[in-house]
Image: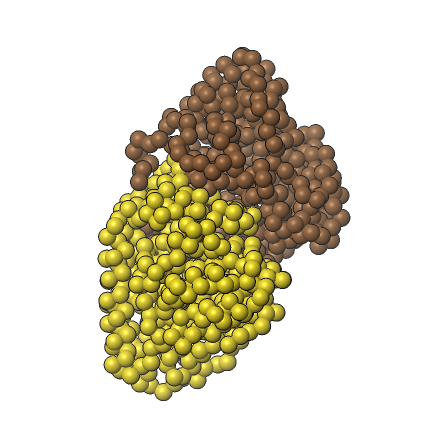
Chain colours: A brown, B yellow
Amino acid sequence: MRCPDEPVVPSTSRRSFMKYASMFAAAPVLGEAHFANAARMAAGGGKAGAFSLGPTATPEDAVLINANENPLGPCKAACEAISAMAPHGGRYDLYGYEEQLTKTFAGQHGLKPENVMVYAGSSEPLHYTVLAYTGPKKGLVIADPTYEAAGYAAMASGAGVFKVKLADDYSHDMKAMVAADPNAGVIYICNPNNPTGTITAKKDIVWALENKPKGSILLVDEAYIHLSDGEDVIDQVAAGKDIIVLRTFSKVYGMAGIRCGMALGRPDLLKKLMRYGMNPMVVTGAVAAEVSLRDADLVPTRKKIIGDVRVDTISWLKQNNYKVIGDSQSNCFMVDTGRPGKGVIAAMQAKNVYIGRTWPIWPNAVRISVGSKEEMAKFKVAFKQVMDAPAAPVVAENEMPMTRDGVVLG
Amino acid sequence: MRCPDEPVVPSTSRRSFMKYASMFAAAPVLGEAHFANAARMAAGGGKAGAFSLGPTATPEDAVLINANENPLGPCKAACEAISAMAPHGGRYDLYGYEEQLTKTFAGQHGLKPENVMVYAGSSEPLHYTVLAYTGPKKGLVIADPTYEAAGYAAMASGAGVFKVKLADDYSHDMKAMVAADPNAGVIYICNPNNPTGTITAKKDIVWALENKPKGSILLVDEAYIHLSDGEDVIDQVAAGKDIIVLRTFSKVYGMAGIRCGMALGRPDLLKKLMRYGMNPMVVTGAVAAEVSLRDADLVPTRKKIIGDVRVDTISWLKQNNYKVIGDSQSNCFMVDTGRPGKGVIAAMQAKNVYIGRTWPIWPNAVRISVGSKEEMAKFKVAFKQVMDAPAAPVVAENEMPMTRDGVVLG
């Protein structure tokens, strides 16, 4: 095995590769991790379309600001809990770690334990919610651009995908989303939005809850909420509304690879997810999340660290007349490069800086994740060099299809 | 948090509880972990049907032989890999741990990397295979008794479930299973079978592959294969047949709570699973599995340890004229107690020994997992006391529904 502290030749996982290869064929379900690897592939190799193995060009000291990861990693107490748990890992959830996590979270957030379902990240419940609540006659409404996973899940359920352009301030256009499909099954809201990092006001989400099509639910993905000043909508869960809120420990808590997340909702709403998959919880993720929740300083401290780096990076970009889209309050933001984004991504990778992907609606914009101060210093140098050089020609590529039989709005 | 080495009052997780509560209503998907906790509940509390929290009666020194867990836990190298990985857990699969695991496994088993899809256990691919390949017009064929998860997944896909009684030697009756549904989508074979631990011969599975209904696939769950002398069917994957084989690190490798498993199949078969869920892999599980595979002594050593305890326990049972069903080659077996099994389970729990559940087809039989030598010594004492006493009255309970609209055979 290549232990994390050993010298390694980093490579991209076969599954990610497989996914990337098939993205262009069938648009399977992808998580942020897979987009990240896909982006590395897309930028570096042009190997898409074939199954292939072997190390990529990603050097060990690469700046990885392509997957909205948290360079701080899990907190120390979480690492210790993981190590302490490992020898006991022969058992399923032996002593109710998942229950303890549920109780701690519920107690901190004004929920009852039955409003909380723990998963190994929020990808599973995101997916299962779309599988459970959309179908050929119950559409999925999403923003454009937004995180793509819900759209991919709709391909399994057979739902039409209704894409609604972000409002002028890059918030979700809730009025247009509510009106997009009178037979909507799920309206997906990512708040702050991925990739723009922009906030949608709680009052707009509450308005949508009161005015959404009958029989639909709101799926509010709060993966990045801790990094922002935006208000969460967990009180709407407590009030018994038609809403499922997703939380993850992948972002502010730095546990993307450790895996822990939650779906929050009425028990009758959550119960329906269980038919679509119910993997026993990874006990290391459960204990790491629980100790992280108990550290009252973790969120404000990390919010400030990441926020300061974001503000500094965006200030620098603006001072240099680069166009940042919207007002990010997250660990990512979009930059309109004024040239094909895929070419910028490739040129940045050639300088050992891996940035995020483009979205079809904004082919000239690239997503930048907020890394460490040191990483962003390297980003600045590389970005200026790339933008000072002429745009490289970009070979045309098929875009990922985001609709099946739904009307595309915006 | 209650760390594993601290004194704890064990309790059952809320999710397991929630599942158990709803088992009787809607039969959701349950993993072995959840059955285990459900059994503890069923035996101890009678709290089913309500959402409830709080410690169960399970004392810390309970003998837990109810979930086919491995008391040996993860090997030392796996624990070390998990600890070393924890601080790097802020990243998704940064350096291709999943790819490395895939390559190691494929290389050891005569497969190509594209035949291997890594998951956080085998529950996900078991579930997704049934979702992908069954439906209202494509039935699921399973043995009776067998592991129930595939049957629950069929409730989400809308497939009829065709149950085929085990043959007289408690192998899968492959001829009857192939004939059970001419429109079958999936024929599920658990080998060795859970709960009986009995083997189905490779030649019978290969025969089924050649004679199964057109358009169907075989789903062969080899979770327990390492513990037996049975032949695996991975070469049928290499040969490109219509088969998906499941492997897990939960059993012989002792990683039930750490989570790692695999689906093995043709790339075109595996690709279809991706629409139903694709959670980023837990990196601790990936590295722990990879180092475990590299330990050539692990499987034979553990097979002997667990096998010796199984043989000793079954010998003792037979010497005392208890009726063991079939010839187990696994870490579990069934005992026909000649009285309602649920009463035996409750009486055993009162003696601090938690044994496995019953199956509807054999209400007098209970499943016993093979624990450590010390645990099985306690089991023997408690079991003899329970069986020497009169049978306690058992309150009638609803059984879990295992069919939806399929014909029940056997």
Q: Quadrant of the C terminus of chain A?
A: top right
- Who is closer to the viewer here, B250 or A55? A55
Q: Quadrant of the N terminus of chain A?
A: top left
Task: Please identify the residue farthest to the bottom as the structure is shown.
Answer: B390
Examine the rendered structure and indicate whether residue B361 appears above or below residue B130.
below
Examine the rendered structure and indicate whether residue A159 appears above or below residue A301.
below
Residue B158 rendering spot, x and y as whole percentages: 61, 62
Q: Quadrant of residue B319?
A: bottom left
Examine the rendered structure and indicate whether residue B10 appears above or below residue B338.
above
Residue A356 rendering spot, x and y as whole percentages: 52, 29
In the visual, does A68 lie left or right of B70? right
Q: Quadrant of residue A328?
A: top right
In the visual, does B256 lie left or right of A145? left
Residue, x 67% and y 52% (percent of image)?
Answer: A135
Residue, x 49% and y 71% (percent of image)?
Answer: B176
- Who is closer to the viewer here, B331 or A245? B331
Q: Is residue A82 visible?
A: no
Residue, x 38% and y 75% (percent of image)?
Answer: B169
Q: Is residue A71 visible?
A: yes
Residue B332 rendering spot, x and y as whole percentages: 34, 68
Examine the rendered structure and indicate whether residue B243 appears above or below residue A369.
below
Residue, x 43% and y 69% (percent of image)?
Answer: B172
Residue B55 rendering spot, x and y as whole percentages: 41, 64
